[in-house]
Image (cartoon, rainbow, N blue to C red):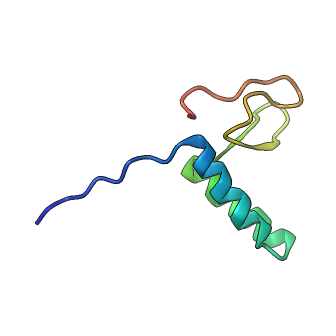
Amino acid sequence: MSTTVTPLLDAETRTAATVVLLAETATAQERAALARVCLRAGFMWRCHPCKENHFLTTGTCGCGAERPAGLD
């Protein structure tokens, strides 16, 4: 039995996938559920001071907080 290791997706690819999925949501409840999944999977990040969600391609929040370290 062999084990295959899947390479990690880059930030642009993860952001593009998130945008496509968010575009298909029909309700606020679906968007909120998808955002929670994306945050836990590392496809998005949340600003701790203001609690806004951001795509990985965003380096700085509108409030001035930087993206947490370790999210590439």
Residue drawn at the location 57% of the way across and 46% of the way down: 42
Q: How many marks?
A: 0
Q: Quadrant of the C terminus?
A: top right
36 displayed left or right of 14 = right
Residue 45, quarter of picture? top right
Question: Outermost residue toward the right?
Answer: 63
Q: Quadrant of the N terminus?
A: bottom left
Residue 69, quarter of picture? top right
Question: Outermost residue toward the bottom?
Answer: 26
Say above or below: 33 vs 38: below
36 displayed left or right of 60 = left
The picture places residue 58, in percent across and down from the top left corner, at 74, 35
Residue drawn at the location 55% of the way across and 52% of the way down: 41
The picture places residue 23, in percent across and down from the top left corner, at 79, 67
Residue 19, quarter of picture? bottom right
The picture places residue 35, in percent across and down from the top left corner, at 71, 58
Residue drawn at the location 64% of the way across and 28% of the way down: 68
Residue drawn at the location 76% of the way across and 43% of the way down: 54
Say above or below: 23 vs 40: below
